[in-house]
Amino acid sequence: MTAAVAPAEASRDDAVLDINGLVRHFTGPAGTVRAVDGVSLGIGRGEIVGLVGESGSGKSTVGRCAVRLDRPTAGQVTINGRDVTRLSKRALRPLRKDFHLVFQDPSSSLDPRMTVGAIVGQPLRLHRLASGDALRDRVAALLAQVGLRPELARRRPHELSGGQRQRVSIARALSVDPQLLVADEPTSALDVSVQASVLNLLADLQRERRFGCLFITHDLAAVEYLADRIAVMHLGQLVEQAPAAELFADPKHPYTQALLSAAPVPDPAAQRSRARIVLSGELPSPLDPPSGCRFHTRCPLAVDRCRAEPPVLRRLAEGGGRRQVSCHLVADDGTAPDAATI
Amino acid sequence: MSAAATALPAAEERGAPLAPLSRLRLLTRNKLALTGAVAAAILVLIAVFAPLIAPYDPARPDFTAALREPGWAHWLGTDDLGRDQLSRVVYGVRASLQIGLLAVALAFAAGVPLGLIAGYYGRFADSVVSRLTDTLLAFPFLVLAVGLATILGPSLLNATIAVGVSQIPAVIRITRAETLRLKHLDYVAAAVANGGGDGTVLFRHILPGALSALTVQATVGIPTAIIGEALLSFLGLGVQPPSPSLGVMLSSAQAYIAAAPWMAVFPGLAIIAATLAFNLLGDGLRDILDPQGDSR
């Protein structure tokens, strides 16, 4: 196993989440799936970090490990300066009011037998933060904050629309006022018409409450709109990490370039004129990742070195050292080949 | 447009459990299930009001009226000791349902916790419980019942225990399978993220989710238990004469099968009716509660 471990971005004191060398392997009858293979990522207080990548790249597994719904195989997860990697279920319980997550599909993440009020109030009840009338008032206030009428507290999830359900899920996650929120593709199960309003709601709530947020998505437009910093994931590893504006303006890694070129741009003229990098083939199997750089099988620029030697995620000197790239072809001063010109 | 409008609510219903009222409506739409429910309700009423319904004392012999054919005085005839068959069938149904319910309750009391533990904790707990289940399944019902009767002595209570124990493996398996299915659902993960412990997860989220499957199992478990009781009583391992039981009645009818066939026919019919009623109800409930079923 060749995990490319690099120091986390936010190993500062104000980091709400610090993931270091995270590895999560799933061992099954077909072999070991290397879902996450050496990911390091930090989130500062009040910072939104977008984690993007294809389906199957391991983004959700990183999210689940970050809130310890899954147990990392190796590596370290630190929340608010406290190492939670090896804590038992019981020891984690009181800490869970500091971090929460919003699941992808609100129709499966809300217990169909519970009322909306009971769902939103459950974290408050379990952490003994409110009960009785106080709990009811808190739930009503939370529902109002996510733009739902307080009367909906008596309804059950199946009586709500998809967008309303996701708002309930957000209200539940924020009920205990966590400092870290993991949002795992919170809009991809929703109708396009309500995606924007749910994104706006998340953005507004984040501005108000200043929680750190790991925003997992494959919707590049959403992440450009929301995130301060973006980490690009490919086959269980990070290939590039940079402030959002810089990443979108000048992607260095060939995979990032391909990913950005696949997203449509709103201007039809620009959309027609720009070069589209089409990757050939499927995402390789995480059961048996390619040797060397895991992207070399699909990379239009791959050279011999890429097939043999796995690149390490390293900080570039260019741009004040805010960018990390894992590619042999990107020079330290930031000069990178353009995959579109090949 | 109208097609889309009618398709939408259906798609909404499939994922979510139905409100109690619409479930009831589905039950009335399913004719066989409704038949089963009505028949089961009648049987339960007969059992509850047995002392009011039975025209005679079911255990008091009347040697002047032995082996009477069905007639006005004794609707279902009398047996070799002159006891009223109708009264005995009514009390027999009562005993059968009592044993059926008690046995199923026993099987659930033991099987549900074990199934939850095996399914939720997995690994070692699962291995232990699964081996226990396999061991119980390896004993044929009769061997188990005869063994228990030999150890504990033949009685109504011990027959109930034997019937109940024989149903534990099925309850464990269903509970375990449901737990395995439910524990990977997002809403269970959400309960953990909410700060819920094992108790919250198991009893507030997983057990309620498994309830429909368990309801079906309980309903089909009752007829199995009724037949089990009849079998044990027939063999003299269950209800002891002179207490009325459908199995005991069948047993004593053997000697008179040619002379007094009604002695065998009516308790037999009662067993068939009770079994059929609960099986129909159980199958109907399965169709209604299982969204994957293709009978809808």
Image: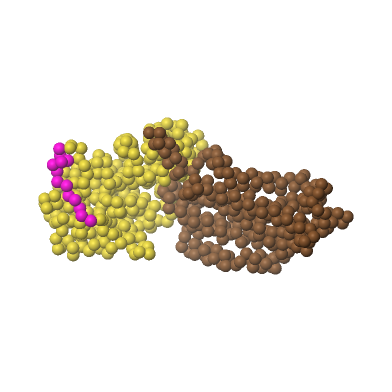
Chain colours: A yellow, B brown
Tell me: B133 left or right of B95: left
Q: Residue furthest front?
A: B258
**Which region of the structure is painted magenta?**
A269-281
- Residue shown at the point (14%, 52%) measured from the top left: A339
Tag count in the figure? 0
- Residue shown at the point (53%, 63%) measured from the top left: B129
Residue A6 visible somewhere in the drawing = no
Tell me: B186 left or right of B89: left
Rendered image quadrant of residue A45 = top left
Residue A280 inside the magenta-drawn segment: yes
A342 and A22: which is toward the camera: A342
- Residue shown at the point (53%, 66%) measured from the top left: B131
Image quarter (top left, top right, bottom left or bottom right) of the N terminus of chain A: bottom left
Rendered image quadrant of residue B172 = bottom right
Rendered image quadrant of residue B136 = bottom right
Q: Residue furthest right?
A: B64
Residue A272 inside the magenta-drawn segment: yes
- Residue shown at the point (58%, 50%) measured from the top left: B282
- The dominant secondary structure in magenta is loop
How far across and how far down the image is residue A279, in percent? 20, 53
Tell me: A206 left or right of B247: left
How far across and how far down the image is residue A138, in percent? 44, 35
Tell me: A55 left or right of B76: left
